[in-house]
């Protein structure tokens, strides 16, 4: 029969080998747990970054889409040729239509040219880009139309469009032409110039300032006869545009479809250019948006090649990016 002393001796502890095996197993489990934690953290960070990039892309497209679809909408009609009171860049500013901060003479009231743009540069001296200036190599897109929301009353100090089925006029003195109820309409004039700034407003950029985080912005005609700078979406590093043009002769039964894509500023769509084609009509717009993360990602190197519009670029940095594109049919220009 074994005594209690003998039992205690047999249970006095573990040997060195057992201890080393226990430490080895514990170390393996600890390394596995740490590895899983790090990978989970990296996955969370990646998902968060891509989610923010996709959100910024959706925000930009959601602002551009409705604006482009309304291009050349003038209330009761879509024919810019019947709208009077506007003026081209090379014409005198109409009385009462002087606008502070206008990007160029008659920029906001150039109804004869409801859509235009600039290829790979910010061409305006009259309105200063936000922050440290416009992003080099990015396009500018300009849209002009009447608001889709009619106004019950005219407002002095705001450019508005009075329209009927066959005529229209811009005015800003609060006194519209006389029209018959139900056959005339008053709406605010909308003019936007989309561009990319090197900076954004306060946000998640380094030091929380927005400096160094590019953004899609726009110059907008606002009440008070002013042009105001507005942020559309942060994180937009590049913005490219091409116009779908129908060059089929006017009156041809084949007219009504895109047969050529051109960059903004192409002479065939510029009435002020010697190379202007009177048959050319912009009937569609394709946009590309290159969205960049708000901060570099340690351990990640972006060497992706991005080919779009007239750009072909390759980066070698630590920023994740997403290239998105969308094509818009210009409903109102197709009708003319």
Image (cartoon, rainbow, N blue to C red):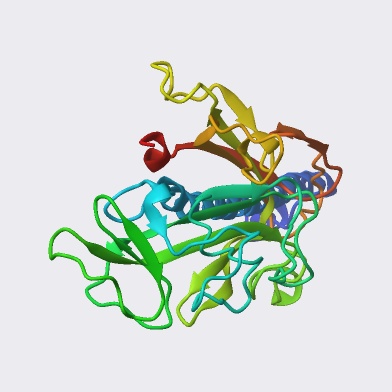
Which residue reaches farthest right?
A: 316
Q: Which residue occupies the foreground of this view, 274 or 194?
A: 274
Relative to 176, say whether 335 is above or below. Answer: above
Quadrant into which the C terminus falls: top left
Residue at (46% x, 25% y) in the render: 250
For residue 70, say whether it is visible.
Answer: no
- 13 horizontally vs 81: left or right: right
Residue 304 position in % (x across, y down)? 78, 35
- 42 horizontally vs 223: left or right: right
Q: Which residue occupies the foreground of this view, 234 or 334?
A: 334
Residue at (55% x, 51% y) in the render: 51
Residue 318 position in % (x across, y down)? 81, 50
- 38 horizontally vs 278: left or right: right
What is the quadrant of residue 167 in the picture? bottom left
Relative to 326, say whether 96 is above or below. Answer: below
Relative to 153, say whether 234 is above or below. Answer: above
């Amino acid at each position: 029969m074994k005594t209690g002393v003998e039992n205690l001796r047999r249970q006095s502890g573990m040997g060195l080998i057992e201890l080393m095996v226990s430490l080895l197993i514990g170390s393996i489990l600890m390394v596995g747990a740490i590895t899983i934690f790090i990978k989970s953290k990296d996955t969370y960070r990646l998902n968060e970054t891509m989610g923010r990039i996709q959100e910024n892309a959706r925000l930009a497209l959601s602002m551009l889409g409705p604006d482009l679809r309304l291009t050349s909408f003038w209330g009761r009609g879509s024919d810019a040729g019947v709208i009077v009171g506007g003026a081209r860049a090379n014409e005198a500013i109409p009385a009462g239509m002087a606008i502070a901060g206008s990007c160029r003479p008659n920029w906001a009231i150039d109804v004869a040219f409801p859509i235009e743009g600039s290829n790979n540069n910010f061409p305006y001296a009259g309105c200063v880009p936000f922050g440290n200036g416009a992003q080099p190599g990015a396009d500018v897109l300009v849209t002009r139309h009447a608001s889709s929301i009619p106004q019950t009353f005219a407002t002095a100090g705001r450019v508005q469009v009075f329209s009927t089925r066959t005529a229209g006029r811009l005015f800003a003195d609060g006194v519209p032409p006389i029209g018959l109820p139900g056959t005339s309409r008053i709406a605010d004039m909308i003019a936007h110039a989309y561009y990319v700034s090197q900076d954004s407003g306060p946000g998640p950029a380094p030091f929380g300032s927005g400096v160094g985080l590019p953004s899609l912005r726009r110059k907008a005609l606002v009440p008070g006869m002013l042009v105001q700078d507005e942020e559309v979406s942060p994180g937009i590093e590049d913005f490219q545009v091409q116009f779908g043009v129908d060059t089929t002769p006017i009156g041809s039964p084949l007219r009504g479809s895109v047969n050529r894509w051109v960059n903004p500023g192409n002479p065939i769509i510029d009435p002020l250019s010697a190379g202007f084609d009177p048959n050319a009509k912009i009937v569609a717009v394709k946009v590309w948006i290159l969205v960049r993360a708000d901060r570099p990602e340690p351990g990640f190197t972006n060497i992706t090649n991005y080919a779009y519009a007239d750009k072909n670029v390759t980066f070698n940095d630590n920023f994740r990016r997403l290239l998105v594109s969308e094509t818009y049919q210009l409903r109102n220009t197709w009708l003319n």
